[in-house]
Amino acid sequence: MTHPFKQSSQYTRFLISAVILFWASSAYAHVEQGQAAGFLTGLQHPWSGLDHILAMIAVGLWGAQLGNPALWVLPVTFPMVMAFGAMMGLLGIPVPGIEVGIAVSAILLGIMVLAEVRPNLAIAAVLVGFFAIFHGHAHGTELPPGQSGLLYSMGFVIATGVLHGVGISIGLIHRWPAGRIALRAAGGFIAVMGVIFLWQAVA
């Protein structure tokens, strides 16, 4: 049986390799300045908001808490559905309550980790995918003028994967009693921050 720490290490190495591969490919192709900036902008975008960071890390934490196959299903589901939400944003298809949806995602995902909720895998994937639409749409609508939507999307999908990897790596501490307590505390912190984000969104 594959050790969970080894799985996390392999997942993180894959994400880093993907970043290097896409970066090198962009440089080799001599894309236009706006296109190159599109990839870099996308790569940086998920790190620009604490609400995005905490929700994406929470996905990794919850996946690690649930174990296989959720350990990889949830971090794969989120970026895939997020890309769909981003496409909606790029096309100008409206989705109501984006900021509220992002805040609620932090609240509920934090609660899942805090309470160690273990639903059916399909339910967990649907919940994660639902919130991914809001995060993706927010990214899509914030594409800077003149930049490549495709490379921008590649950038923020890779960055999201890295954040999931961070969450998984942290979440593996649940294997120890003290680690489980710390993990639940982290979930509570994310949920509280989500409430603050929600207050800011509706104020």
Image (tube, rainbow, N blue to C red):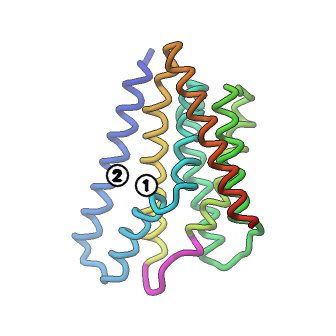
Q: Quadrant of the N terminus?
A: top left
Instruction: State the residue position of label 2.
Output: 18
Q: Residues within 10 Å of mark 2 (few under 14, many from 20)?
A: few
The relative height of residue 17 versus residue 86 in the rendered view (above or below) is above
Q: Residue furthest bottom?
A: 146
Q: Position of residue 119 (x, y in %)?
A: 74, 29
Where residue 191 sits, quadrant-wise, is top right
Q: Position of residue 115 (x, y in %)?
A: 70, 27
- Whether tag 1 and tag 2 are in contact, CB under 8 A, the answer is yes
Where does residue 189 sit, x and y in percent of width and height?
A: 60, 39
Prevailing SS of the magenta stretch:
loop
Q: Which residue appears at 53% of the width and 25% of the height?
A: 182
The location of residue 203, given as percent across then percent down, is 74, 67
Q: Is residue 142 magenta?
A: yes
Which range is magenta? 140-147
Identify the amino acid type marked 2. Ala
**For this view, does 35 lie left or right of residue 142?**
left
Which image quarter: residue 31?
A: bottom left
Give the residue at mark 1: 158
Q: Secondary structure at mark 2?
A: helix
Q: Secondary structure at mark 1?
A: helix
Q: In the depicted view, which residue is nearer to us: 35 or 141? A: 141
Instruction: Tell me the residue at 28%/65% (across/down).
Output: 25
Amino acid bearing label 1:
Ile
Q: Reply yes or no: does residue 184 show up in magenta.
A: no
Residue extending furthest toward the left: 28
